[in-house]
Image (spheres, helix red, strand yellow):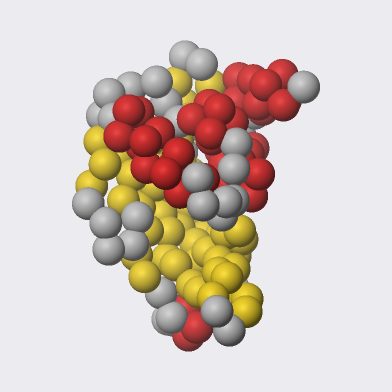
C-alpha cells in the first residue's frame, strides 16, 4: 500500500508530494519510502548538521539506516518557502525536531534546503542540506518587500 502511494505521488505528483512523503518516511523510519523520494542518480547529495557531504544513494541510504536503527526521526517542516520552475524546485524551511534526552523530550531546530528535479520517473529529491538552527529560527529574519499599486 505504501509503495503504491509513493509511486502515485512521485510519478503524477508535485515536489510538495515528495516532500510530504520524505518527512512521513522519517516519522515512520521507513527506509524504502525515504529512498523512493530520491532521484535515481549517482550525484544526489545529503548533508546533515555538522556532518560530511554524502554523495550517491549508497551513502545516503547507509546514513539514514544508521539513524533509523535508533528509532524514527520526528522532524516537522515549518516556515516553508519555495522557489519553483518547470523542472526544478527549491524548498527552504525550518525543521522542528523532537529529541529525547535524559530530561525528557526537547525541541531542536534545523535549517533545511530540499532540492527537487522533475525526472522521467517524476519529481524526485536531488539534495537535502541541513544546518544546525536555534529556537530563534522559528521566525524568519528579514523583511518581505511591500508592493504598492
- Please report the residue visible at 33 percent of the width from the left and 62 percent of the height from the top: 49
Judge from the rendering whether residue 22 lies leftward or rightward of residue 62; answer left or right. right
* 25 vs 80: above or below: above
Q: Residue at x 26, y 56 (%)?
A: 51
Closest to the observer: 74 or 103? 103
Is residue 45 visible in the rendered structure shown here? yes
Q: Residue at x 55, y 79 (%)?
A: 102
| Image quadrant assignment for residue 100 | bottom right
Residue in front for this viewpoint, 76 or 70:
70
Q: Position of residue 71 (x, y in %)?
A: 57, 51
Is 26 placed above or below 124 here? Answer: below
Q: Quadrant of residue 54?
A: top left
Residue 66 image offset from top left, x and y in percent: 42, 44
Q: Is 29 left, or right, of 2 in this rendering? A: left
Residue 125: where, in percent of width, then height? 45, 35
Q: Quadrant of the C terminus?
A: bottom right
Q: Which residue sits furthest left?
A: 52
Amino acid at each position: 500500500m505504501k509503495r503504491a502511494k509513493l509511486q502515485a505521488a512521485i510519478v503524477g505528483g508535485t515536489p510538495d508530494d515528495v516532500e510530504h512523503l520524505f518527512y512521513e518516511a522519517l516519522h515512520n523510519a521507513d527506509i524504502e519510502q525515504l529512498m523512493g523520494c530520491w532521484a535515481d542518480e549517482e550525484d544526489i547529495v545529503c548533508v546533515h548538521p555538522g556532518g560530511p557531504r554524502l554523495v550517491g544513494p549508497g551513502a545516503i541510504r547507509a546514513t539514514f539506516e544508521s539513524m533509523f536503527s535508533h528509532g524514527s526521526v520526528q522532524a516537522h517542516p515549518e516556515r516553508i518557502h519555495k522557489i519553483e520552475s518547470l523542472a526544478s524546485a527549491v524548498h527552504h524551511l525550518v525543521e522542528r525536531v523532537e529529541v529525547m534526552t535524559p530530561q525528557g523530550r526537547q525541541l531542536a531546530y534545523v535549517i533545511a534546503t530540499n532540492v527537487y528535479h522533475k525526472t522521467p520517473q517524476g519529481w524526485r529529491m536531488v539534495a537535502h542540506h541541513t544546518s544546525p538552527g536555534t529556537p530563534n529560527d522559528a521566525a524568519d529574519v528579514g523583511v518581505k518587500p511591500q508592493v504598492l499599486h
